[in-house]
Image (spheres, helix red, strand yellow):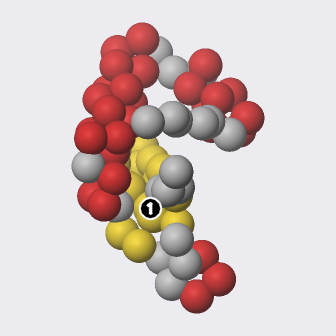
Amino acid sequence: MRILLSPRFSKQVKKLHPTEKKILDKHVLKVSESPNIGAPQVGELTGIFIYKFKIKERQWLMAYEIESK
């Protein structure tokens, strides 16, 4: 499986404390192991999934799509 990060997401990750980054890595791994865990979007965003999680008090929304080979 290939995971690509947007430039904006990468900038936010760089600003995280190392313990927060570990939490983020756990959630990315969780999504990679079970891609259908996120909520599928409808309309123009069909094919996009949103996975919500919190790091400390801040809520993060991870948007991703599943591509077939």
Residue 49, above or below 25: below
In the image, 24 versus 2, the foreground residue is: 2
Residue furthest top as drawn: 18
Residue 15's x, y, as percent?
Answer: 60, 21
Q: How many marks?
A: 1
Residue 15, above or below 61: above
Residue 29's x, y, as percent?
Answer: 32, 33
Element on which disc 1 rests:
strand
Image quarter where the N terminus lies is top left
Residue furthest front as drawn: 69
Which amino acid type corresponds to the residue marked 1 in the rendered image? Ile
Residue 48, above or below 60: below
Q: Which residue is mark 1?
A: 50
Residue 57's x, y, as percent?
Answer: 35, 42
**Residue in view at x 56 percent, y 26 percent:** 13
In the image, 41 versus 33, the foreground residue is: 33
**Residue in view at x 42 percent, y 21 percent:** 21
Q: Quadrant of residue 9?
A: top right
Local crowd size for mark 1, using a 10 Å CA cut-off: few (<14), some (14–19), many (≥20): some
**Residue in view at x 61 percent, y 36 percent:** 5
